[in-house]
Image (cartoon, grey):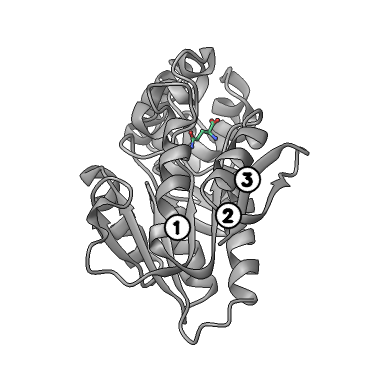
């Protein structure tokens, strides 16, 4: 990486001259040069390889045009695991860890010998795989309508050595032949089709069908709540993530579908982020 005698660009120059936040510059440099954060600090005056510097500038341009960091570097951490992501899948969000933590807590009190969990609309597989890694004794089945998403999910399961059965199809449609489940979880599209956030930030680059139901934001949540009882064992639980202002509506959907002990959990920002109940 050093070209002795020839002055060139070094990490310190790139950090000093970039308009991106320092952390993002460091992440892009780590990605391009395949080095750790500590390497960047220890070698901040080393001359960097010319091709790498050009690649770095191309990524900076894409970032400045708004592309999400996770798509540029190809991965995002979730529940302490590195998940590969690409433009066909939703980028895992920190608030969705609440859904996984709740699923793990539900499973801790589950009396079945070999509990069965279903994740609907798995995307990158982050929820299903994190549950499977926390509870390797549990059978985890995950569906998604998108072939592109399932390819990423399968790759993630393999890379993280998680055992998950992935099936392609819309929500419950591809499940025929499956036994009922102890727990169903989902982070479905729940953003209203006219929500201006869809035209802002990372969301502009994420798959629209993973974000919005193309309607009032409650359609997928309602479909899942109404159909989950047909796929749950007696006493089985359903937990879904939803928008910041949808908790009361989702509790209503769950009660209407026959769920008991319906309640919501708040995320780290104090927002009611997931709702669920038991049959
Ligand atoms: N939590 C995401 C957001 O608001 C939306 C994900 C979803 O619709 N399931 O950015």
In the depicted structure, whether residue 270 falls above or below residue 83: above
What's the residue at 39%, 24% (across, down)? 205
Distance from the alpha carbon under mark 3 to that under mark 1:
18 Å
- Percent of width and height locating residue 246: 62, 31
Picture quadrant of residue 271: top right
* Front-most of residues 144 and 111: 111
Q: Quadrant of the C terminus?
A: bottom right
Distance from the alpha carbon under mark 2 to that under mark 1:
8 Å
What's the residue at 42%, 27% (across, down)? 212
Q: Earlier in the sequence, mark 2 or mark 1?
A: 1
Q: Residues within 10 Å of mark 1 (few under 14, many from 20)?
A: many
Secondary-structure class at tag 3: strand
What's the residue at 47%, 17% (across, down)? 64
Q: Is the shortest distance between ligand 1 and the CB of mark 3 under 8 Å?
A: no
- The residue to which callout 2 is attached is 259
Q: Earlier in the sequence, mark 3 or mark 2?
A: 2
Label ID, residue 274: 3
- The residue to which callout 1 is attached is 229
Left or right of 49: which side holds 196?
Answer: right
* Front-most of residues 252 and 38: 252
The residue sitting at the bottom extreme is 113
Q: Is residue 113 visible?
A: yes
Left or right of 55: which side holds 107?
Answer: right
């Amino acid at each position: 990486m050093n070209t002795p005698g020839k002055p060139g660009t070094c990490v310190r120059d790139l950090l000093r001259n970039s308009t991106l936040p320092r952390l993002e510059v460091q992440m892009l440099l780590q990605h391009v040069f395949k080095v750790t954060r500590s390497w960047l600090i220890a070698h901040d005056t080393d001359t960097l390889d010319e091709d790498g510097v050009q690649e770095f500038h191309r990524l900076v341009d894409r970032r400045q045009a708004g592309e999400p960091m996770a798509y540029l570097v190809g991965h995002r951490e979730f529940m302490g695991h590195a998940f590969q992501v690409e433009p066909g899948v939703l980028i895992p969000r920190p608030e969705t860890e609440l859904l996984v933590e709740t699923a793990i807590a539900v499973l801790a009190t589950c009396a079945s010998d070999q509990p069965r969990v279903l994740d609907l609309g798995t995307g990158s597989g982050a929820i299903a795989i994190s549950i499977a890694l926390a509870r390797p004794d549990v059978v985890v089945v995950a569906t998604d309508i998108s072939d592109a998403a399932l390819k990423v999910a399968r790759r993630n399961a393999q890379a993280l050595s998680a055992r998950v059965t992935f099936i392609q199809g819309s929500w419950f449609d591809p499940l025929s032949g499956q036994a009922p489940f102890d727990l169903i979880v989902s982070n479905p599209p729940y953003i209203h089709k006219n929500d201006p956030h869809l035209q802002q930030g990372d969301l502009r680059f994420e798959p629209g069908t993973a974000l919005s139901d193309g309607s009032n934001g409650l359609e997928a949540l309602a479909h899942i709540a109404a159909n989950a009882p047909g796929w749950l064992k007696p006493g089985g639980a359903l937990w879904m993530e939803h928008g910041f202002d949808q908790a009361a509506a989702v509790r209503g959907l769950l009660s209407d579908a026959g769920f008991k002990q319906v309640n919501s959990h708040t995320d780290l920002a104090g927002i009611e982020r997931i709702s669920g109940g038991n049959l």
